[in-house]
Structures are given as structure tokens and as C-alpha cells.
Amino acid sequence: MLSWVVAGVHVWLLATGLGLDATGRTLVMLVGGYALAWVAGFVVVFVPAGAGVREAVLLALLAGALPHAAVLLVVLLTRALLTVVDLVFAAVGMLVRPARSR
């Protein structure tokens, strides 16, 4: 749940930077919306990492709140940033894991 909150807050920060009202209501909406998008991507098993599914849910969620170009930018930046975060955590994990004894 913590990861959904952090990811939802990051989506909210991106969206408010592009014109979404910075209220508690929109924060809760985007944290919940991101959690819904993540679950939808997890449930649809025929695409890797929910590719396209999470984005479609976020697009639908933000469709009326921002201009189309801003919504698309938020969705694409979200996918790109979360991919970078995954790669950074994988690299850190490889660096800190104990060396195997021979």
C-alpha cells in the first residue's frame, strides 16, 4: 500500500504541476486511481507489467481534469519514471547482495 501511496503522490505532483487543482480531494483521487490502475495492470496477465493497461486507467481518470496533452504527458512520464526507479532499485540490489562463496 505504501508503494501505491508514493506512486499516487508522484502522479499528483506531476498533474498539479500541469494545472490540476492541488487539493486533498485530488490527492486522494490520484492515490486511489493509481492503486486501481496498478491492480488493473496486474490482473491483465497477457501484457508484461501491465503495459498499456495502467496507462489507460490513468488516462480515463485524468481525462476531464486536464487538457489531453497534459494527461498524456503525465501518463507517459509516470511510466518512464517508474521504470527508472525499478532499474535503480535493481542496480542497488545487485550491489548490496552478498557475494556467493565458491
Image (cartoon, rainbow, N blue to C red):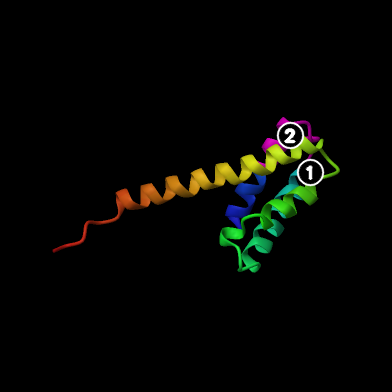
* Foreground pick, 23 / 54: 54
Q: Amino acid at mark 2?
A: Thr
- The numbered disc on residue 26 is 1
Question: Mark 2, residues whose alpha carbon is within 10 Å: few (<14), some, or many (≥20)?
Answer: some
| Residue at x 79% of width, y 43% of height | 26
| Residue at x 56% of width, y 42% of height | 81
Residue 22 vertical placement versus 48 (above, below): above
* Foreground pick, 53 / 42: 53
The magenta segment is 10-23
User: Residue 22: x and y, percent?
Assistant: 77, 35
Assign the N terminus to one quadrant of the image.
bottom right
Image-based side of 34 in relation to 48, left or right: right
* Foreground pick, 80 / 17: 80
Assign the C terminus to one quadrant of the image.
bottom left
- The numbered disc on residue 16 is 2
User: Residue 48: x and y, percent?
Assistant: 56, 61
Spatial CA distance of label 1 from label 2 is 9 Å
Give the farthest residue toward the right.
64
Q: Secondary structure at mark 1?
A: helix
User: Residue 32: x and y, percent?
Assistant: 73, 54
